[in-house]
Amino acid sequence: MELLIVSAMSKPADWQSFLKKFADAANIEEWPGNPGASEGQLLVAEKRLKVKFPPSYRAFLTASNGWLQASRAVPFVRPVEDICWFRKEHRDWYEAYQMSAEPLSIIEQDYFNYAQADCVSFDFKHLAQTLCVSEIGDDAVLLLNPMVVWPDGEWEAWFFANWLPGAARYRSFADWMRQELDQLLNQPFTHTATPGELPTVYLDAPGKPNRRIRPREEVLVLETVLERLRSKKKSDRVKATQQLGLLGGKQAVDALLDALKNDPEKEVRWRAADSLGLLGAPEAVEALIAAIDDPLVNTTAIHALAGFKDERSAQCLLKILEEGGMYATSATNPLVKRGDVRAIKHLVHFLTATASDNPRVQHIGDIAGRLISPFEDAGYVALEPLMVHPDIKVRHRAILGISDIAYCAKEKIVRRKAYELLQRFLETDTDTGLRQLIEVSITVSTKKNLK
């Protein structure tokens, strides 16, 4: 089959040919498309949304106003009358993701190299401005991102799913559709790109007059950044530690280790710790563990250990949690990110320690259910038996964790299990206050579990 590149997908006739091949490849007997949208329909939708659709998507709608068999995970691409802003239609999903999203840390040239892009990395600030052009499939949707616009007018496309750590990004709607066809044909997919080309990235939402454009990112040169790290100005050194985390490599790691140990400014040291965590270089483990004793850097060093998988740092984090000191809850987050379920045993200990007269133990116990919930299925297994614990306080703490799983779990089956557990205990728990808490939790998580 000949390659249909983006520039050749900006006309309805090209899409008509493409969609015929798509339907043939999927062995679909009944045509899965619709009559094309008229220019009037497109203009009405563009006026409603205050945008001008990107060329390949607009041409697709003109060829077929919706498509019923786009992919396994997102089968139904919507007709133009049904598309809407993601944050408005899926507010609970958007808000839940915002709570767990992390700032973007990747060089611009790498970020827009879709062939090498890591789906964990995407600019979560753009999520609020994305246009949802599909129904929910397998806990997944297809989004178009008007904050990233390529020179030919194409918007970035995102395949966004609960079960992905981020979003799989494509240069355009056409690229995503080509990828789906290539999967049907069992052939490799090649992202379309022009070497060295970068998109315009906007700071303002679409529809706003005179949208501001994000300045082009500085091209980083290792020698320049290392020189900046030797500057007498703190701000230069802080920036250099951040940039070294983007550049990577042995020289960058060595320079960051030196800054972590020897720079007199606390902000430089904790930025160095953060960058070492991003790079995940094995030689940084001991230095980060040692930095936990630095009261001005300790929490950053603890969080940086999330980027490693070694047993030495795992034991360090588990010990901090087990001892229940000031930084016990800080140690939980990196253990969650590492998927180290050994943390659950210690959290259950605090959750059930309701008789302790130690305020720190009680504080950890009060939030232990919620700290367990990000472990999802393993967290559910630990919390379920505590729902029948004779101590009302233990049950209350467990309910909080199960409620979080019912609302926030990425795996639909886990989310549903927690939701159904809440429903069962609404009928059986004997405490009026706990039943009221469960009832509120069911109400909050119902929409997430009845899709």
Image (spheres, rainbow, N blue to C red):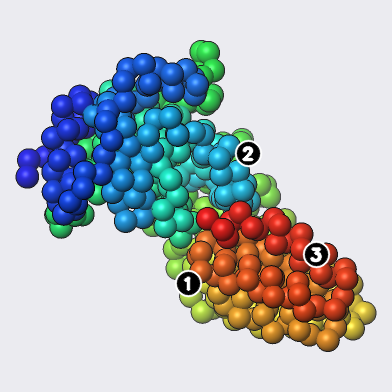
Q: Which mark is residue 437?
A: 3
Closer to the camera: disc 1 or disc 2? 1
Closer to the camera: disc 1 or disc 3? 3
Tell me the quarter of the image containing the N terminus: top left
Q: Amino acid at mark 2?
A: Lys
Q: Amino acid at mark 3?
A: Leu
Q: Which mark is residue 309?
A: 1
Residue at far top of view: 210
Residue under the image location 19 percent in, 52 percent down: 28
Query: Residue 427 vs residue 15: left or right?
Result: right
Residue at far right of view: 357
Which element is circle 3 on? helix
Residue 347 image position (x, y, % from top left): 71, 77
Q: Which residue is mark 2?
A: 234
Contact, CB < 8 Å: mark 3 with mark 2? no
Residue under the image location 63 percent in, 67 percent down: 419
Does the image show residue 70?
no
Residue under the image location 73 percent in, 82 percent down: 386
* Dot 2 crowding, Cα within 10 Å, few <14, some 14–19, many 20+: some
Contact, CB < 8 Å: mark 1 with mark 3? no
Measure how far apart labels 3 and 2 are at the Cα level. Answer: 50 Å
